[in-house]
Image (cartoon, rainbow, N blue to C red):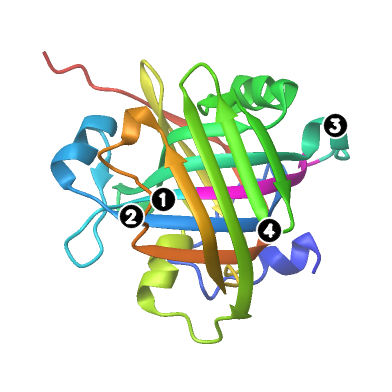
């Protein structure tokens, strides 16, 4: 499907796409989703007060999404695979801002050092380099600085033809929110609905010392997706309000 066709497919979106010109194209492929229900009091320690934590049936959620970023490029330039293609792991939660629902990243790891530096410089998203390797049935990462480790052994199941409301709530998000020292940045995105498959986790080892009260070796929900083609708009910045 062409970018024009993707942009013209909008019935699944909760709000209209932005009217200004998009800035980046990227693909989020072969994604493993691990989801946990968490306690609000613990999650609040990690989310800036300017963002409202979103709930499903009264509970907040945190997710690990391990996937492969491919073909990322600015609108008018081609992709360059040594920089454009890399494995990525993000730990995210679900938030609201000005009536728009989106995600907030607690952590983002990339498997290529240069790609992390460029992505962080352009977007101000909290990219950091980790050693990541993946095969058809294994996804593994380690980060010496934070003592973070992830190891997933899995097999992919059948496509889920009828997604339930929680499936959609956890995946259909069309904004990213992130804080810097002085501001909250918002990024609008667009893609078709995520295709979702069952996944059978054969072995799982999750060790993120900073988030031990949020994530562990027993997710409350798991999903797999072949991926989506993503169009992203530029960064919108709103200064934080200082309340002493």
> For the residue labelled by badge 4, is the local secondary structure a helix, a strand or a loop?
loop
> For the residue labelled by badge 3, is the local secondary structure a helix, a strand or a loop?
helix
Disc 2 residue crowd, few under 14, some 14–19, many 20+, Cα 10 Å: many
Residue furthest to the front:
203
Q: According to the image, label 3 marks what residue?
A: 82
Q: Is residue 67 magenta?
A: yes
Q: Which label belongs to residue 137? A: 4
* Picture quadrant where residue 226 is located: bottom right
Disc 4 to disc 2, C-alpha distance: 22 Å
Decide: is 244 above or below 88.
Answer: above
Q: Which residues are magenta?
A: 65-75
Report whether 115 appears left or right of 13: right
Q: Is residue 50 magenta?
A: no
Label 2 vs label 3, nearer the camera? 2
Disc 2 to disc 1, C-alpha distance: 6 Å
Does any portion of residue 15 appear in the rendered image?
Answer: no
Q: Nearer the viewer, residue 146 or 21?
A: 146
Sooner in the amino-acid sequence: mark 3 or mark 4? 3
Q: According to the image, label 1 marks what residue?
A: 63
The quarter of the image holding the N terminus is bottom right
């Amino acid at each position: 499907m062409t970018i024009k066709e993707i942009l013209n497919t909008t019935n699944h979106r909760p709000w209209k796409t932005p009217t200004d010109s998009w800035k980046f194209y990227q693909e989020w492929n072969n994604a493993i989703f691990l989801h946990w229900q968490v306690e609000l009091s613990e999650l609040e320690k990690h989310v800036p007060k300017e963002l409202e934590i979103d709930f499903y049936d009264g509970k907040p959620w945190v997710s690990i999404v391990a996937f492969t970023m491919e073909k990322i490029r600015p609108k008018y330039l081609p992709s360059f695979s040594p920089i454009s293609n890399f494995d990525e792991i993000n730990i995210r939660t679900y938030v609201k801002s000005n009536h728009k629902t989106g995600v907030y990243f607690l952590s983002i790891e990339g498997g290529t050092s240069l790609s992390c530096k460029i992505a962080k410089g352009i977007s101000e998203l909290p990219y950091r380099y980790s050693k990541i390797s993946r095969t058809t049935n294994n996804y593994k990462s380690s980060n010496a600085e934070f003592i973070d480790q992830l190891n997933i052994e899995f097999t992919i199941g059948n496509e889920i033809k009828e997604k339930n409301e929680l499936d959609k709530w956890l995946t259909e998000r069309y904004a990213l929110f992130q804080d810097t020292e002085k501001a909250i940045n918002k990024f609008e995105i667009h893609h078709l609905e995520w295709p979702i498959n069952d996944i059978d986790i054969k072995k799982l080892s999750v060790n993120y010392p900073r988030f031990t009260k949020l994530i562990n070796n027993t997710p409350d929900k798991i999903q797999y997706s072949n991926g989506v083609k993503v169009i992203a708009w530029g960064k919108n910045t709103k200064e934080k309000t200082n309340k002493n």
